[in-house]
């Protein structure tokens, strides 16, 4: 069975500081990995995805993530955050099991303070 | 603006009411999904439609009844709901058949409150 672990439930950070949101997955088959962001009172927006190829993936809003197969990780990073990045971030994996089924982590609340 | 549109944005209903949630997309996607999200939790998959046919029902109670009248529309009919059904209901769509590597596009959800 596949699973996703987001190691931090909350990450407070000051504006313009770098941030890393951690995600580890477990899977016995090839995986496809996604990061989604959810702003208050909104749905989920795709930030970036890893399907194959380069392990460094660039997404929207200046975010990037690195797929590390040996460490089964897919951490999300941004070199300088803004107040507007305050949101809930979900790591998700698909692969195996139900077709098209996304397995979500529990989420990380990023709070950017001035 | 999201490309998946959900209506209504908010819904308050009693336990004996019948109501419907609607979802619409015009991206030509042929897979559509319903998720339930409780506060401070990740979304939980409820149903998947592929080419207007129900392909996955994640053991959802029968008081939730999905319907896909055409490739652009997805409904969720609600009847005799319980207070624990209060949640944010998200619709999503993806290209082609439900595929492991196709990202899903989400609507902003309907926030449902059961009195």
Image: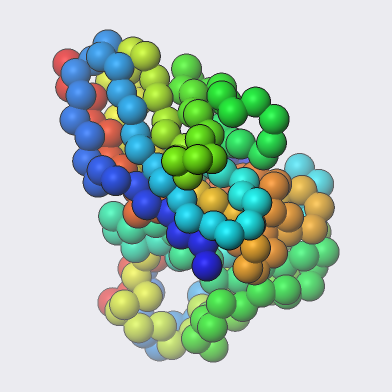
Q: Is residue A104 visible?
A: no
> At 72% across and 73% down in the image, what residue appears?
B55
Classify A87 as above or below B42: above
Question: Residue B35, position in %: x, y?
Answer: 51, 63
> At 57% across and 64% down in the image, what residue appears?
B34
The one nearer the camera, A7 or A109, is A7
Question: Residue B19, position in %: x, y?
Answer: 51, 75
Q: Is residue B84 visible?
A: yes
Residue A108 falls left or right of residue B71: left
Which quarter of the rendering shows the N terminus of chain B? Answer: top right
> At 37% across and 75% down in the image, what residue appears?
B85
Q: Quadrant of residue A71?
A: top left
The one nearer the camera, B63 or B40, is B40
Which quarter of the rendering shows the C terminus of chain B? Answer: bottom left
Question: Residue A53, position in %: x, y?
Answer: 69, 30
Question: Residue A14, position in %: x, y?
Answer: 19, 18
Q: Residue furthest front?
A: A70
Q: Quadrant of residue A56?
A: top right
Residue B52 falls left or right of residue A97: right
- The image's colour scheme reads rainbow
Q: Quadrant of residue A90?
A: top left
> At 30% across and 17% down in the image, what residue appears?
A18
Q: How many marks?
A: 0
Classify B97 as above or below B17: above
The one nearer the camera, B70 or B10, is B70
């Amino acid at each position: 069975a596949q699973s996703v672990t987001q190691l931090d439930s909350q990450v407070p950070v000051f504006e313009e500081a770098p941030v890393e949101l951690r995600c580890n997955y477990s899977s016995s088959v090839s995986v496809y990995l996604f990061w989604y962001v959810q702003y208050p009172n909104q749905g989920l927006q795709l930030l970036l995805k890893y399907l194959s190829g380069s392990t460094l993936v660039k997404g929207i809003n200046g975010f990037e993530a690195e797929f590390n197969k040996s460490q089964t990780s897919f951490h999300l990073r941004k070199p300088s955050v803004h107040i507007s990045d305050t949101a809930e971030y979900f790591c998700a994996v698909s692969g195996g099991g139900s077709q098209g089924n996304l397995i979500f982590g529990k989420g990380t609340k990023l709070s950017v303070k001035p | 603006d999201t490309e998946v549109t959900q209506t209504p944005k908010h819904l308050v209903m009693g336990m004996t009411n019948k109501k419907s949630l609607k979802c619409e997309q015009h991206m030509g996607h042929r897979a559509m999904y319903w998720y339930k999200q409780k506060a401070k939790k990740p979304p939980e998959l409820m149903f998947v439609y592929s080419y207007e046919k129900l392909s996955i029902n994640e053991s959802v109670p029968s008081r939730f009844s999905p319907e896909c009248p055409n490739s652009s529309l997805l409904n969720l009919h609600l009847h005799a709901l319980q207070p624990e059904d209060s949640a944010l209901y998200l619709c999503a769509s993806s290209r082609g058949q439900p595929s492991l590597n196709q990202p899903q596009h989400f609507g902003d959800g309907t926030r449902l409150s059961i009195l």
